[in-house]
Amino acid sequence: MPGPGRAGRRGGGARRPKWFARGGRGATRTQVGIIGAGPAGLTLALLLQRHGIDAVVLESRSRQEIETTLRAGVLEQATVDLMGELGVAERMMRQAQFHGGIEIRFGGRGHRIDFVRLTGGRRIALYAQHEVIKDFVAALLERGGRIEFSVSGVALRDLDGAHPRLSYRAEGGAREIDCDFIAGCDGFHGPSRAAIPEPARTEHGQVLPFSWLGILAQAPLSSPELCYTHSDRGFALLSTRSPEIQRMYIQVDPDDDVAAWPDARIWEELRARTAVGDGGWRLIEGPVVQKGIVDMRAFVCDPMRYGPLFLLGDAAHIVPPTGAKGLNLAVADAQTLAAGLAAHYGSGGDGLLGRYSEICLRRAWRAVRFSMFMTRLLHRDPAHGPMERRVQLAELDYLTSSEAAMASLAENYVGLPLQW
Ligand code: FAD
Ligand code: DHB
C-alpha cells in the first residue's frame, strides 16, 4: 500500500478560506472530494462542514431518487446521538420509534432480548434510511454545502501522483475537481474501490444462499418491537416504519422473482412463519404498497485506504442485513475519517488518518461476524440437514436463556462503541 503519509504531506495544514476555490489547470478544487450522497458521504460532508473543511459531493442519481429509495430502518443509539450533535435530529426525534429490545421467535414462542437492561440503557431507533437522507441533504444545502446531483462518468485520476482529482460529466459538460483527498462513498457498485490497483487490495466475499423479499404494508403494528423469527419454512422479520406502515421481510431463494410472490402468498408465508403456539397472537395484514428482493452477501475490502483515497461504507464492506449494521457502519467510517481529516488540517497530525483503515476494518469485521451469526442463527440453509437444524435450535435455546449470550447479542445490536 502506498505510504499513508503521502497525501497527508500534500494537505500542508493550511485551512482554505472557502471550499470551492479555483485550482490549477483550469480545474476547480476542494479539500475533500466525496463520491456518493448515501449515509457515508452525507455524514462525512456534514462533519467536515462543521470542522470548516471544504468538500463537494458528487452523486450520480437525482435528489428525488436518493430521497425515495427504500433501504435500512434501524439506527443505533450512537447514530441517533451523532444526528443530535450535527443538529439534524429534529424530525427523527419526532417521527422515529424507539425500541428498548427485540423479540426472537422460534418453535412457536417469543423471547424478548431487553437491550435497555442488558446494555445500561441503550436503545435503537426505527427511522427509514431515505428519511435520514432527506434530513442530511436539507441540512447540508441549507448550511451552504455543495452536492452535485445526477452527475455521470465519475473517474478517480492520479491517485499515485501529485494531483489527485475527480473528473465527471454534469449539465454543461465535462468537469474536473482537484482534491487533497477523495472519499469513496459510492456504495458496493461505485468506481472508488476499483480505482485501487488490484495488487494493492484484497477482497473477501461470500454470497449467501438466500435472499430477502421485503414489503411495506399499510397496517397497524402486529408486534411492539422488531420480531426476528426462525421457522422450518425459513426466516421472517417484522419491522416497522410508523404506527401505520409496517416493513416485513421473508427469506426467499436467491433466484426467486417478485412476480412469483403475489400478496396472498406473502401473507400466507408470513402468517405461517410467525405463528405462535398458543394462538394468542395474530399478524395484522393490510395492503402491500411496495415489494422487492435483495440478495445477501458479506464483503470486505482490505485496505480501506490507498494514498489520498479513503473508502467508506458499502464501497468497502457489505454485511448481511440480519444484524441491521450497514448504515451504522457507514456512519462510523465517516466519523473516523472526519476526525482524521480534522486532525490533519488542524494541529493533530496524521496519526489517525494513518490508522483509518485499521480502525474501520476492525469494526467492519466485528459487524460481519455479528451479522453472519444472526444470519446463520435464523435462516434455513438449503444445504443443512436435520443435524444442523437441531444444532441451530440448541443455539437459539442457549441464546434466549443465557444472560451472557443475551448480553452479547444486545451489545452488538445496539452498536459497539467507536474506538480509535
Ligand atoms: P449507499 O447508501 O449505497 O450510497 C452510495 C451512493 O453513491 C448512492 O447514492 C449512489 O447513487 C452513489 N453512487 C454510486 N455510484 C456512483 C458514481 N459512479 N458516481 C456518483 N455517485 C455514485 N443498514 C442498517 O444499518 N440498518 C438496517 O436496518 C439495514 N437494513 C437494510 C435493509 C435492506 C433491505 C438493505 C438492502 C440494506 C440495509 N442496510 C441496513 C444497509 C444499508 O442500507 C447500507 O449499508 C447503507 O446504505 C450504506 O451506505 P453508503 O453511504 O455506504 O452507500
Ligand atoms: C430492518 C432491516 C434490517 O436489516 C433489520 O435487521 C431490521 C430492520 C428494517 O428495514 O426495518
Image: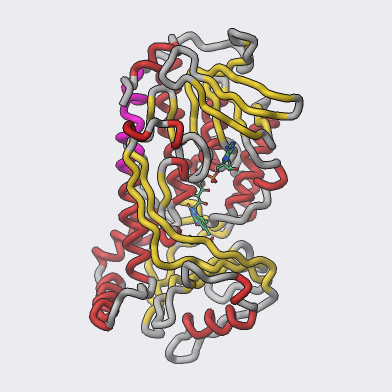
**Residue 376 location, quadrant:** bottom left
Q: Position of residue 200 (x, y in %)?
A: 33, 31
Q: Residue at x 63, y 50 (%)?
A: 131
Up the image or down, 338 lies above or below 404; here it is: above
Query: Is residue 375 part of the magenta span, yes or no?
Result: no
Which residues lie in the magenta part?
350-362
Q: Nearer the viewer, residue 116 or 44?
A: 44
Residue 221 drawn above or below residue 346: below
Position of residue 83 in the picture relative to residue 303 (left or right): right
- What secondary structure is the magenta-colored segment mainly? helix
User: Could you tell whether 391 is left or right of 45 in the image?
Assistant: left
Task: Estimate the x, y position of residue 77 in percent, counting from the top left.
Answer: 46, 49
Seen from the viewer's position, the closer of residues 192 and 179 is 192
Question: In the image, is residue 203 above or below residue 239?
Answer: above
- Residue at image position (39%, 62%) is 208
Circle count: 0
Q: Quadrant of the N terminus?
A: top left
Is residue 372 visible in the rendered image? The answer is yes
- The image quadrant where one finds the C terminus is top left
361 in magenta: yes
